[in-house]
Amino acid sequence: MTAERPARRFPLALGRLGGATPAKAKSPAPRSGDAGPAMSRPQRHVATAHADAGRRAAAVGLGLDSADVRARMVERLRGEGVTHPLVLAAFAAVPRHLFVDPGLAAQAYEDTSLPIGHGQTISKPSVVARMLELLCGGARAGEAGNLGAVLEIGTGCGYQAALLCRLGKRVVSVERLRALHDRARELLAPMRDSRLRLVFDDGMRGHPPGAPYDSIIAAAGGREIPQAWLDQLAVGGRLVSPVQQAGAGQVLVVVDRHADRYTRTVHEAVKFVPLKSGLAG
């Protein structure tokens, strides 16, 4: 979830994902004095209504797809203290509105979490950006200029996976809810990027076949960080996850793996869905 180095981009993918389809040029409506077929008054009303509807649809689509909309979100993130250039570039490139319910698309670029069904949410942009920036601060990420091999626990709608693909060399994203896994696969399909692998499995087990991971990030929090995640973290790697503190709420915890030990630092309070085990249809 809630980043980097010069990562390879998805020029074609994000063009498909976020670019507005150019509207076909339309012949101008006949004006008074123009040569054109005569229309009855009802026909003119129908034609005018269709033209107005088309203009409204185009305005909505272009507004959400506009890079300026994402740029304003990035400026808000910058104002809240997010400074890593690659994290900001990822947010500027990935169209968040494509990963939320169409009925909530107008709120996609606000700093708010939104429901994605099945009791889950897409996290606030500021929280996602904060976690990605913390992830970028790991030793291996700093040396390589990117997140390397990334494990994401909790694919959700796929938005963070799309961001991670702009920051890491390869991304494995694990989701335990079948409906969300299938939906994320559909939403991320236009990227057609071989570096991204979506896995339907119990995220508490991590994903051993892809280990070790340079970066691990979780979108759900339990009382402990699963040992499987720690075991799959590479030496020099960094893990960022919400953790439930006894008698208190969740906080962000950063774990760095060294050759002979792990170090742990605690950051600000957050609120994520609880970490659960097992698969659900």
Image (spheres, rainbow, N blue to C red):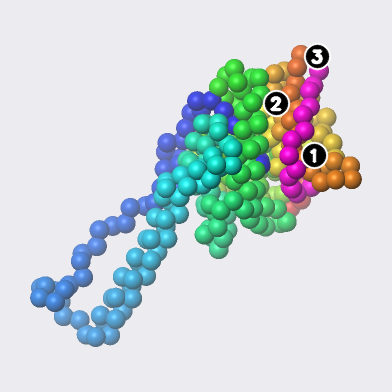
Marker count (numbered): 3
Are there few (<14), some (14-19), or many (20+) residues within 10 Å of tag 3? Answer: few
Image height check: is 217 above or below 25? above
Q: What stretch is highlighted in magenta?
A: 261-275
Amino acid type, label 2? Arg
Marks 3/2: CA distance?
14 Å
Are there few (<14), some (14-19), or many (20+) residues within 10 Å of tag 2? Answer: many
Task: Write down the residue under mark 1.
Answer: 243
- Mark 3 lies on a secondary structure that is loop
Are there few (<14), some (14-19), or many (20+) residues within 10 Å of tag 1? Answer: many
Task: Write down the residue under mark 2.
Answer: 238
Marks 2/1: CA distance?
15 Å
Task: Write down the residue under mark 3.
Answer: 260
Image height check: is 36 above or below 100? below
Q: Is residue 269 magenta?
A: yes
Check the image and name the residue furthest to the right: 247
Amino acid type, label 3? Asp
Instruction: Name the residue located 10 percent from the left edge and 73 percent from the top edge.
Output: 35
Q: Specify whether residue 209 is in view.
A: no
